Image: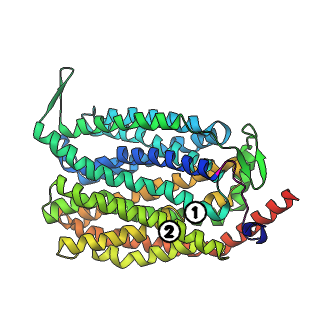
Amino acid sequence: MDRATDSPAVNYTAPSQTVAGGWFLVAVLSVASVVSYIDRQIINLLVEPMKQDLGISDLQISLLQGFSFALFYAVMALPLAWVADTQNRKWVVIGGVIFWSAASFSTGLATSFALLFAARMAVGVGEATLAPAGTSMISDCFRQENLPAAVGVFTGSGFVGSGLALLVGGYVINALTLAGPFAILGRSFQPWQVTFMAVTLLSIPVLLLLALVREPVRRDGNRTIAVDDAPSRLEVISFLKANLQLIGLLALGLACLVAAQFGIGAWTPSFLIRVHGWTQLQVGQWFGPIVMAGGLAGVVGGGFAAQALAKRGVVDASLRVTIAASLMAVPFAIAFPLVSSVGLSLALLAAVLVLGTVPFGAGVSIFPSITPNRFRAQVLALYLLIANLVGYSLGPTVIAWFTDSVFGDPLAIGRSLAIAPAATLLAGCLLLALCLKPYRQSLAQRAMSSLAAAA
């Protein structure tokens, strides 16, 4: 008998297709995630030319980096997740790719802060469709003890996209800057605008790969779920009320950890440019590979570490690994922007990324493990809504607020980076520590329900 069925504290999820098919799905969704993050994160390398051309402040830039996504989530995340729970998830993802690509192209057409904000808000559809629908699909292809690793690969791909946005973007922006303004259809566009337009071409191979994906059979434990077996609003609300403490604390805790990492990712390029005198090309050459390698190592490594502990009988392994890694990241987060040597700063930053990104795999995998399949995407979307409102908004904005309002000096960005991410890491760990007991109880209840349904 499989080990997962022996323990009442581990929910068994039968795979709906072959292991190879499951990992092919993970690979395709990961490629989509890479492109999604390139579209989203390329703005971090374009801060200085955008500020110069449009005359906008650090605080306004931070709103474009984070709050614009959060505002979209506040309106559309849950309705889109309901569609993912009740319709073919593959086509939900394809629709999201088309929409976010058009929005990213529109960013290059913007000539004011208001137009930029609207376009960046629409780019948020990528996360609003891809993450909930993709994680829901993956959860139908892997057993419970293997799910953190699969989710870790999927979410870790986002850091590959973030790194490529910096690495490749640095070369592209450098080449476009040397070429000067571009005349397109009788209108002149600056290099930063053309960069936004160019990255949308990456969505074409993504759409071709998604056409090859099969929609997994929906499963809840050992029971197959019909796609039209839609939960009522009352059923979803009842589940959330019954699990309010766990889901609420878990979402807020992970959102704080997201805020730390997103704030670091958003403002480190400007820190290197302002404090250490680097060019955008240098930032891309050095910071890009660190984001890719560090983020991927943290997310995927954390997922496999949680999987290994779960197979040894540690039922709350995903949560324990998340808390431990985040606590270890705190001293590195404080130190990297304060040291004078740029080489040492990058080395410390790499440690922050490896440890601080563990929650993006191990932590996120907790949600499908405690949620019935029939509204799994909606619960994930609720978490992402909170992560965006708290994490993606709070992370960049608090750093910008410290720089603009507390220190009043753009060159003080290093001090802002040393304070805000460390504080949010600690807050997140405290909230997650309160989840340990209810998480174990939820896993035990799910396991007993699964065994009863199988009998």
Residue 134 % position (x, y): 56, 47
Question: Badge 1: how crowded within 10 Å, few (<14), some, or many (20+)?
Answer: many
Q: Can residue 440 be spotted in the picture?
A: yes
Question: Badge 2: how crowded within 10 Å, few (<14), some, or many (20+)?
Answer: many
Reading the chain from its start, which is encountered first: label 2 or label 1? 1
- The image's mark for residue 148 is 1
172 sits to left or right of 19: left
Quickly name the residue at label 2. Answer: 302
**Magenta run includes residue 36:** no
Rendered residue at 60%/75% (across/down): 309
**Identity of the residue furthest to the right in this view:** 455
Q: Amino acid at mark 2?
A: Gly
**Quadrant showing the C terminus:** bottom right
**Quadrant showing the N terminus:** bottom right
331 sits to left or right of 26: left
Q: CA distance from mark 2 to mark 1?
A: 8 Å
Q: Secondary structure at mark 2?
A: helix
Q: Are marks 2 and 1 in contact (CB under 8 Å)?
A: yes
Rendered residue at 74%/36% (across/down): 228
Total numbered badges shown on the rendered structure: 2
Q: Secondary structure at mark 1?
A: helix
Magenta segment, which residues?
11-18
> Considering depth in this image, is 326 or 16 the residue closer to the camera?
16
Rendered residue at 52%/53% (across/down): 384
**Identity of the residue furthest to the top in this view:** 186
Residue 388 % position (x, y): 46, 53
Residue 390 % position (x, y): 46, 58
Q: Amino acid at mark 1?
A: Pro
20 sits to left or right of 28: right
273 sits to left or right of 14: left
Residue 369 % position (x, y): 66, 60
